[in-house]
Amino acid sequence: MADDKCLFCKIINAEQPAEIIFENEQLIVFKDIFPKAPVHLLVVPKKHIASMNEASEEDSELITHLMLQLPSIAKANGIGDGYRTILNTGSKGGQIIFHLHFHLLGGGSGTLPGF
Ligand code: 5GP
Ligand code: ZN
């Protein structure tokens, strides 16, 4: 199931270091290495799905689980009162790592979008 050339699969398999915040059977959460906000986490399914364009009906429970975990992950990291969730799809959509992930950003003093 893992793609051995995929950076996030390597993090999931502990072959590549990351600041891991939380994990369960289905997902892992770690800090973005180049944070764009005071809190910038990546919420990543353990199953390798390249992007939303490759997700299928059989992934619906997994993706729903990920999304429903966002409030508690945000709360546990001090941004439960407001955060931004970003999902980039395809290089034209700003995606650099082709393993599906949600960005969870927050913690700035001002209002969005500038953090
Ligand atoms: P994308 O543009 O694909 O939606 O987001 C990929 C994110 O992964 C970027 O925000 C980038 O900073 C982050 N990233 C790239 N390489 C690494 C890495 O080796 N470790 C971690 N923790 N994050 C990374
Ligand atoms: Zn992967």
Image (cartoon, rainbow, N blue to C red):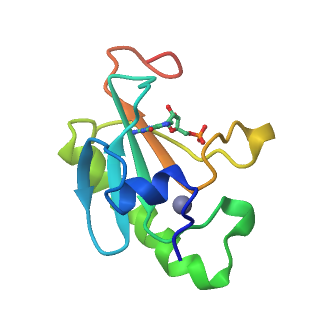
In the current view of this chain or complex, which residue is farthest to the bottom? 58
Q: Is residue 61 left or right of residue 5?
A: left
For image coordinates 53% across by 21% down, the residue present is 113
Q: Quadrant of the C terminus?
A: top left
Work out whether residue 78 or residue 4 is closer to the camera in this orientation and state it. 4
Work out whether residue 83 or residue 36 is closer to the camera in this orientation and state it. 36
Q: Quadrant of residue 25?
A: bottom left
Work out whether residue 18 or residue 76 is closer to the camera in this orientation and state it. 18
For image coordinates 34% across by 59% down, the residue present is 28
Q: Quadrant of residue 33?
A: top left
For image coordinates 22% across by 40% down, the residue present is 77
Residue 99 % position (x, y) = 58, 56
Residue 41 % position (x, y) = 37, 40
Residue 104 higher or lower than 13, as above or below: above
Residue 90 % position (x, y) = 75, 47
Residue 47 higher or lower than 23, as above or below: below
Quarter of the rendered image showing ligand 2: bottom right
Residue 40 % position (x, y) = 38, 33
The image shows a total of numbered marks equal to: 0
Residue 60 higher or lower than 93, as above or below: below
Work out whether residue 100 or residue 107 is closer to the camera in this orientation and state it. 100
Q: Is residue 50 left or right of residue 40?
A: right
For image coordinates 39% across by 64% down, the residue present is 68
